[in-house]
Image (cartoon, rainbow, N blue to C red):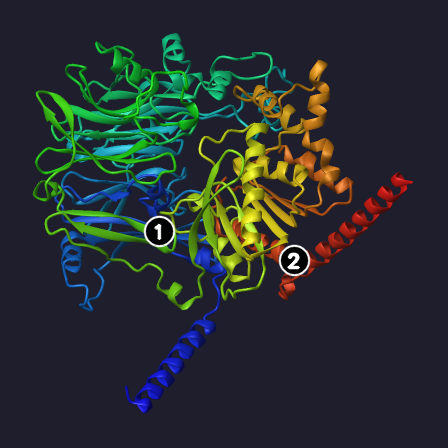
Amino acid sequence: MDLRLFVFLWSFWVGYSGAVEAQADTRRPFNVEDSIRMVRIVEPNAANSVFMPTKVELSPDGRFFAVVTQKGNLKTLKNEYELILYKTQDVLDYVNVSIRTDRELPEARVLTRGATDFNEVAFQSLKWSGDSKSLSFIGYLEDDAKVPGQVYEIAIETGKRVRLTNHPRPITQFAYRPISDKLLFASTLSSNNPDAAKPSYLVGVRNVNETFMPEEDAPPPAIQYYVQDVQRRQANPSDARRVGDVYPGSYWPFIWLSPDSRYAVVLVTNKIGPAHWMAGYDYLQSSFLQMSLAEFDENTMRRREDMLTQFSLIDLKDETLRPVFDAPTGLYKGGDRVEAHWLPDSKSVVLLNTALPLVSDSPDDLAKRKQFFAAAEYTIATDAIRVMDYFTLFKSLRNPDAPSFPDVPGGHFTDFSLLADGTARLEVVDDRRDALPTRYFRKVDGVWRAIASVDDAETISADLLTVSVHQDVNTPPELAAHDGLTGARKVFTDFNPELRDLSMAKTEVVTWYDGHVRDWRGGLMRPVGYEEGIKYPLVIQTHGFFPKEYLVDGPFGVSSAYAAQALAGKGFVVFQLEDPVGYSQDLEQFMAYRHGLESLIDLLSEQGLIDREKVGLIAWSATGAPVQNMMINSDYPIAAAVVADSYNYGLLGYVGQFGYKAPAMAYMEKMIGAEPWGERLPLWVARNPELHLDKVKTPLRYEQYEKGLSGWWSIYTLLKRQQKPVEYYVFNDAAHGLVKPSHRLTSQQGTVDWFSFWLKGEEDPNSDKADQYVRWRKFKEQQKASVLNALKARGRAAH
């Protein structure tokens, strides 16, 4: 090559790459306000795509589909929602155009908008009418019904919105097709506490919040199903007729309506598991379930009546409800989701992740029914059950002494569909929710038989267009379309183009062994502007990691205290930690969690990525207890921590469980391994975290979202008494997973400010935060004095 040409090309490359770097450097980092303003897909819920396919339902005529988006408005402090309509043909045309063609995205028509300060999505549970001329949904709208959470119908052509129900309580789920002239819905019953108006009342077995705040803390809710005729608009509450019994619990009910609108499969709670269930199914032998269902103490706890669920069938013709069959589902205590998929003839329904009746002519099949959950077809007229496949739903609930079936892997079913030739397709994930190979079945002589694979010609979907949520750990959620005829697939939305103008951190999947018993996995996010050789402060976010989920705040799309991208934008290494498979809440597991955290700190320190003296922890919900254990018992320095809406396994947390559902206080005894009396009192004293807070050197920020007394109140007051840096924030009218922009701003920005102050010594110059830093600087002086006093005391003890 001519030397002059080489020099020219080299000069051009250096100039070009420098320009790119300069351009990258000029983009500002992502922050908390960007997270709140992001457009998010909430119907279907993009967060659910981590666990199962989130397909968008097409209108019956195949011409349209609709989604709902949400974004926060930091001026009004409300969430803004849009119900968006797409034309199927426009999307198909876009998908099948060459990728090199610069073509505008398909038109997105906004049918209706809503801005609310509720903790609920404004438009949820979208349902198409049979003639494809309207959509119905549950609406939480500030400008309409006295009671939010009513069913509405909106005309596709005109956008006119009409309310179909006027129920006295919010509706939690519904099914409606005008072909049947009936609307089926579920609602919680009124749960006003009658003792609030009494001059006095007996405590009995009441929890502390019911006892001292009877006007606010009512008895546990119950679910009731209703049927209502829909010829009359603006219906009266009396128009709704009850179907079935009252079912205890606060599950979000599921309703799966048959294509002909004659039947609906629903979930009901089973008050007490029948004796043959308790003795027959292995998963009901787990310690937590046994404590919840068997070890019941009427002196200190309420009986748990909502632990088990069961598929039931509603006949809309005679308005009756009965169990589908004699078995529980795989959904317990908010566990993994179950599904029902009707076959086109409305005579049979495929149920996913359900136990099956303990009756079988085959010994092997009976053994599988005791151990595993199934995908099975149920036929209404004959009560026939045709098994497709078995999977082990909960690894932590497996019986090691049961017969071994190597062909039954761990995991659960996520979706069912029929191909054009009648072949059944089952989507499955493993214990870590990673996708496993799709499983195919064909019905031969009335029996579903597995087939190894299908020919390409046979995999043509019965649906011309499939629309689903597309995302991964570094890709924000968008809508993607797949043409079942041509096989073409493409993303056709661009909800957050402004993200391209921001400097965003990338996440990489990391796996390691903790040196004890577990393999771990998580997402490593290097700070924006990362430079080799610099040791950065580290913030570890707990409670789950999913490579298929876009990591912007925290796991499951939760923003409670989590702020991954915003922290990376402020110069932190961020690590999102996967919950260990089979994790349970007891001291043995807390130790395992500690091994995971400590080995992660060792790993990142050995790689030269972090300053191990500047490590912060974030916990939410269930991970508050193991993080608390880490702060008290680990020799590894934790420079700061944030814990959001969790529980404490100390004495206040223990007595605070009095009067709640089983296992209540018994569960706390299992966690700590002793009772606070008798021979095991010394063990309780040794393990009660409240009695060892003198070991805590970690500045702590705690956030409480739910009403009432929190077990962390004792941690807060005892740390305050010992002059240790601690803050306690109470959020009014907050959801466990924060939704309101005002709540998110306080929580997430508080997290960023807290770690910036304690791990980096930085303060936000915003004058509105002046009082915050006066308080925190005082904390720092207290911390220094506490360390100095401890050193003096140690010196006196040595002499």
Query: In front: 250, or 692?
Result: 692
Q: Residue at x 79, y 48 (%)?
A: 787
Give the image location of residue 704, x and y in percent. 59, 40
Give the image location of residue 517, x and y in percent. 51, 33
* Location of mark 2 (residue): 757
In the image, is 45 to the left or to the right of 740? left
In the image, is 651 to the left or to the right of 139? right
Structural crowding at the residue carrying mark 1, measured as other residues with C-alpha within 10 Å and reported as few (<14), some (14–19) or many (≥20)? some
Which badge, 1 or 2, is on the more N-terminal residue? 1
- Is residue 185 shown to the viewer in this render? yes
Q: Residue at x 14, y 62 (%)?
A: 97
Classify the position of the C terminus by image quarter.
top right
In the image, is 44 to the left or to the right of 398? left
Q: Residue at x 52, y 19 (%)?
A: 662
Real-space CA distance between mark 1 and mark 2, rounded to the nearest whole angstrom? 32 Å
Tag of residue 123: none
Helix, strand or loop at label 1? It is strand
Residue type beneath disc 1: Asp
* Location of mark 1 (residue): 472
Structural crowding at the residue carrying mark 2, measured as other residues with C-alpha within 10 Å and reported as few (<14), some (14–19) or many (≥20)? some
Q: Is residue 342 above or below residue 495?
A: above
Residue type beneath disc 2: Phe
Classify the position of the N terminus by image quarter.
bottom left
Q: How many marks?
A: 2
Q: Do labels 1 and 2 touch, CB within 8 Å?
A: no
Helix, strand or loop at label 2? It is helix
Outermost residue on the bottom side: it is 4
Outermost residue on the right side: it is 799
Q: Is residue 135 above or below residue 37?
A: above
Give the image location of residue 277, x and y in percent. 37, 12
